[in-house]
Amino acid sequence: MRPFAYLRAADAPSAVAASAERPNTMYLAGGTNLVDLMRLGVAVPETLVDVSRISSGAVEESADGALLIGAGVRNSDLAADPLVRRRHPMLAQAVLAGASGQIRNMATVGGNLLQRTRCSYFQDVTKPCNKRQPGTGCPARAGDHRNLAIIGHSESCVATHPSDMAVALTALGAIVHVEGADGPRTVPMPGLHRLPGDEPDRDTVLDPGDLVTAVEVPPLPFAARSRYRKVRDRASFAFAVVSVAAALDVADGVVRDCRIALGGVAHAPWRAETAEAALRGSAATEAVFARAADAELAAARPLADNAFKVPLTRNVLVRTLIDLVETS
Ligand SMILES: Cc1cc2nc3c(=O)[nH]c(=O)nc-3n(C[C@H](O)[C@H](O)[C@H](O)COP(=O)(O)OP(=O)(O)OC[C@H]3O[C@@H](n4cnc5c(N)ncnc54)[C@H](O)[C@@H]3O)c2cc1C
Ligand code: SF4
């Protein structure tokens, strides 16, 4: 690992100022992703600004019933929070489906949102990779892409976003609070993470030096009936092959409203707006769920070795919606 300077910021504005004053600065939270990437030589910051203690480590309820989750909240604490578990079970389930107990004790909400792809070429500095080194090419497209994107990818990059938590937050329409050089602002989800286009080195719409300070989850009463279902190669300690976060509001056998996001299929958590539109006002039956899933996945463009993800995603989505109806 290359030598680097270490600073501990006192608050969000001073973290942003410290980042602006020094070239090649990165924020350090739990370090469970960044330190691995530094060891691999993928990330080579000259300065680390430790932000793990500055942002709120609390989940708070605002006057309008939204939950404000500090960027420094540890993943374990988020998953155990009684309000999160009662109001947004899919969020608690998504966090618990990720990593291991030890990692969740260290990992923060801000770091989880901004963790980098697990594409093996990205993590191997002896290989070309447009995301790590723009213009060098994408060996995954013709190489190992079994677990990479089936939708929204580009010639430049076919990587997937790895966070389970971000999939649930996308379904819930979370709002990310950011402190930047021009002060605070908010970024909606979906909208934080980008599709790769011809700039796959940019995972998100954030600018260098932007600091995530909190994530707001707006009130969504029917999300009390929600679920996160993840398919992975091992029972634990494995990233999603595909995943579904869904909430369903059914009355008299008809879908009044729903929220769906997909993980493991794209460069960003994928809000399934086509499926949602097909479901609203329709009968809550397996046949309708299957048609909605097919409508969403009509945009899929699988690669040679990951076409299996299309029927897998369809089946996981349909099963998740059936489960939500049966447990209502
Ligand atoms: C073995 C293993 C298995 C895993 N399995 C899963 C899994 O199944 N599902 C899953 O979702 N995750 C999984 N993870 C990833 C894990 O969830 C992330 O490593 C963790 O959430 C990152 O959080 P952190 O606080 O440690 O971030 P860090 O490693 O400190 O930072 C990650 C990135 O975010 C930036 N950053 C951190 N905080 C901020 C902030 N407030 N504002 C702006 N930028 C910031 C950093 O600069 C860095 O680029 C796994 C990790 C490991 C090591
Ligand atoms: S898929 Fe993206 S991250 Fe993976 S090698 Fe290609 S450019 Fe790099």
Image (tube, grey):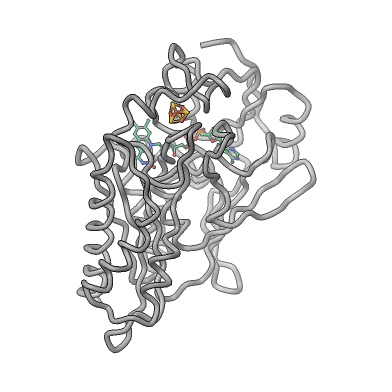
Q: Nearer the viewer, residue 268 or 24?
A: 268
Figure label count: 0
Q: Residue furthest bottom?
A: 252
Residue 227 locus on image (x, y percent):
31, 62
Residue 3 locus on image (x, y percent):
59, 10
Residue at coordinates 73% horizontally, 51% vertically from top-left? 184
* 291 over 178 or under it: above or below: below
Residue at coordinates 57% horizontally, 53% vertically from top-left? 191
**Where on the picture, by quarter, is residue 291?**
bottom left
Q: Nearer the viewer, residue 87 or 238?
A: 238
Residue at coordinates 28% horizontally, 50% vertically from top-left? 310
Horizontal relation, residue 27 to residue 144: left or right: right
Q: Nearer the viewer, residue 123 or 75?
A: 123
Q: Nearer the viewer, residue 8 or 165?
A: 165
Q: Quadrant of the C terminus?
A: bottom left
Residue 159 locus on image (x, y percent):
43, 35
* 184 over 54 or under it: above or below: below
* 130 over 244 or under it: above or below: above
Residue at coordinates 37% horizontally, 60% vertically from top-left? 296
* 36 over 262 or under it: above or below: above
Horizontal relation, residue 61 to residue 305: left or right: right
Residue 301 locus on image (x, y percent):
37, 45
